[in-house]
């Protein structure tokens, strides 16, 4: 009898988890290309989100880190800010703002991916807006030199991958919605 109660309890818990997933992602499972796009973009967006959180925490607790790890983060930021033409306080303030806005952008992008999974084309403008705001903050708020020298090649390539994959998926989804077949060479693939 106890075994039956446990399995029904597990089923109830599993049903609740499935309910939440169904609510977020919908009832129907998408095609393979949508899944690949979704999982790739979720992975990249999560990496950017985690990195933004770590950056914000390191910036916010720099004195605590100095006390325990003897790493003078404020000196590192001051030197880097001076090379980019900022005062130490201004650079720290701008980095803090960048990290907060980037956390918001990446959470926004991650939430738009639920629409991608559901094959709703509205995901695209939401995702692109989040990416453009993030890149705009890097490029214009901290400056071209920051974007060129302090944004890693991995970040730049990842942003390009996010843009290209989402654009290609959007194009395919729009073709699918209109009932047209895909033809990359000008002839029907039938």
Image (cartoon, rainbow, N blue to C red):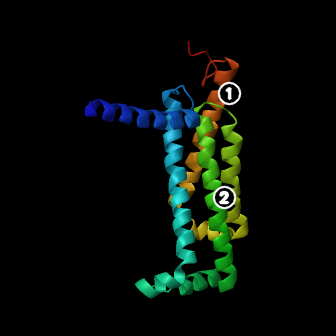
Mark 2 crowdedness (10 Å alpha carbons): few <14, some 14-19, many ≥20: many
Quadrant including the C terminus:
top right
* Residue 170, above or below 158: above
Q: Any mark on residue 13, and which?
A: none
Cβ atoms under marks 2 and 1 closer than 8 Å: no
Residue topped by disc 1: 174
Is residue 92 found left or right of 154 in the rendered image?
Answer: right
Give percent across and percent down for residue 7: 32, 32
Give percent across and percent down for residue 42: 52, 46
Quadrant including the N terminus:
top left
- Residue nearer the viewer, 117 or 151: 117
Give percent across and percent down for residue 135: 66, 58
Label 2 sits on a secondary structure element that is helix
Residue placed at 68% from the left, 77% from the top?
93
* Residue 60, above or below 29: below
Is residue 171 found left or right of 158 in the rendered image?
Answer: right
* Residue 39, above or below 69: above
Q: Any mark on residue 134, and which?
A: 2
Label 1 sits on a secondary structure element that is helix
- Residue nearer the viewer, 39 or 28: 28
- What is the quadrant of residue 95 in the picture? bottom right
| Count of numbered circles in the view | 2
Residue 110 visible in image = yes
Toward the front, the furthest residue is 1
- Residue nearer the viewer, 25 or 33: 25
Residue placed at 56% from the left, 63% from the top?
52
Sequence-first tag of 2 and 1: 2
- Residue nearer the viewer, 144 or 69: 69
Q: CA distance from mark 2 to mark 1?
A: 26 Å
Residue placed at 54% from the left, 71% from the top?
57
């Amino acid at each position: 009898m106890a075994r039956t109660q446990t399995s029904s309890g597990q089923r109830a818990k599993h049903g609740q988890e499935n309910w939440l997933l169904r609510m977020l992602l919908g009832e129907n499972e998408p095609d393979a290309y949508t899944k690949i796009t979704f999982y790739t973009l979720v992975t990249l967006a999560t990496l950017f989100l985690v990195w933004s959180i770590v950056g914000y925490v390191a910036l916010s607790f720099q004195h605590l880190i100095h006390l325990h790890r003897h790493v003078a983060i404020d000196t590192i930021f001051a030197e880097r800010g001076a090379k980019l033409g900022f005062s130490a306080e201004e650079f720290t303030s701008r980095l803090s703002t960048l990290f907060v806005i980037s956390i918001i952008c990446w959470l926004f992008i991650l939430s738009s991916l639920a629409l991608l999974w559901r094959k709703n084309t509205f995901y695209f403008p939401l995702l692109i807006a989040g990416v453009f705001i993030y890149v705009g903050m890097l490029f214009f708020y901290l400056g071209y030199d920051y974007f060129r020298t302090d944004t890693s090649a991995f970040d730049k390539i990842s942003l390009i991958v996010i843009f290209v994959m989402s654009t290609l998926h959007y194009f395919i989804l729009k073709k699918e919605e209109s009932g047209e077949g895909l033809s990359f060479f000008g002839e029907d693939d039938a």
